[in-house]
Image (cartoon, helix red, strand yellow):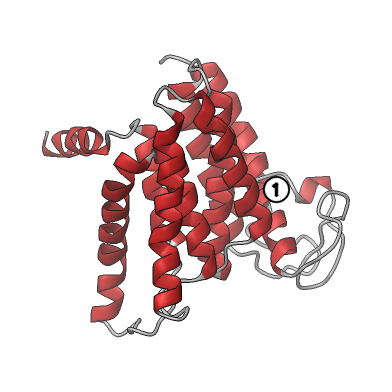
Amino acid sequence: MQNLFPASLAALFGLALGSFATLLIWRFHYDEKGIVTGRSRCTKCGKTLGFWNLIPLFSWIFQRGRCAFCRAKISVYYPLTELLFSITFFIFVQKFYSNSGAWFLFASLFFILLLFVSDVRFLEVDKRISFPALLIAFAWAFFRDLPVAEFLLGGVIGFLFYALQYFISRKKWVGAGDMELGALMGLLLGWQMLLPALFAAYILGLLTCLPFLLFGKMNRKTKVPLGAFLLPITLLFLYTENNPFEFLSSFFSLLSF
């Protein structure tokens, strides 16, 4: 398998990034200080966690999902986030490690995953995450194979698509952060692939939410994190280089075999 060694290193690095992401999202959400220098603590007993308590994924496994001090349960959210980062980086690095502009892609991956986890967990798009993501996507547009206008126009259209909904509905249909997600999606994919990507994201959202609606677990007023659908579809389009239909066709062919 090509690029297996760098991809494996990226998977390990992804575990560390996922662990850092859980810390970053928590401190942003609760406006805690010491994002870089602050010591990690158990959210239940307040004990400062040592190195052996903070090894991504493995500490959670060895401690059987509990705090080493008070034995309170540690949410499965932490190892799942770490695994999400690890698997995503392995897959993308394995395919794109030798490509020009790969480092822009890998930086974008980090912020896409960060936004995804933040929106799913806390229903928020933090500007301290989305603005750096937009800046990286904007800079990357000048190094892509297609004309820069393709991506800049995509960013404008993605922003306006949600800005119109935001102001027409008086903040009822979408949140302010969704405008930033729309702009990011357009900057990364370009205007020509933005519409199919949005369509795919809404189909994914429908398929995800429909069972909950049918069984009364959700209703029309339930808030849903739009980033939970926009961002995975953005990753799919980036991975397939804006040709997700070929990927899906190969996937279903594999299943039928």
Q: Quadrant of residue 253?
A: top left
Q: Position of residue 162 (x, y in %)?
A: 42, 63
Q: Position of residue 104 (x, y in %)?
A: 57, 30
- Quadrant of image for the N terminus: top left
Left/right placement of residue 229 relative to residue 58 reads: left
Q: What residue is pinned by disc 1?
A: 20
150 or 221: nearer the viewer: 150
Which residue is pictured at 30% across the width and 85% down the height?
216
Q: Position of residue 189 (x, y in %)?
A: 39, 39
Q: Quadrant of residue 138?
A: top right
Which residue is pictured at 72% across the width and 44% down the height?
55
Which residue is pictured at 57% across the width and 46% down the height?
134
125 or 8: nearer the viewer: 125
**Under tag 1, what secondary structure?**
helix
Whether 206 is drawn above or below 15: the answer is: below
Q: Does the image show residue 231?
A: no
244 or 150: nearer the viewer: 150
Left/right placement of residue 250 relative to residue 170 reads: left
Which residue is pictured at 32% across the width and 34% down the height?
242
Q: How many numbered discs, if any?
A: 1
- Mark 1: which amino acid? Phe
Q: Does the image show residue 56?
A: yes
Q: Quadrant of residue 9?
A: top right
Left/right placement of residue 208 relative to residue 88 reads: left
- Count neighbours of disc 1 (C-alpha within 10 A) and say few if under 14, some if 14 to 19, many if 20 or more: some
Whether 156 is drawn above or below 41: the answer is: above
- Quadrant of image for the C terminus: top left
Q: Position of residue 61 (x, y in %)?
A: 62, 50
Left/right placement of residue 150 relative to residue 254 reads: right
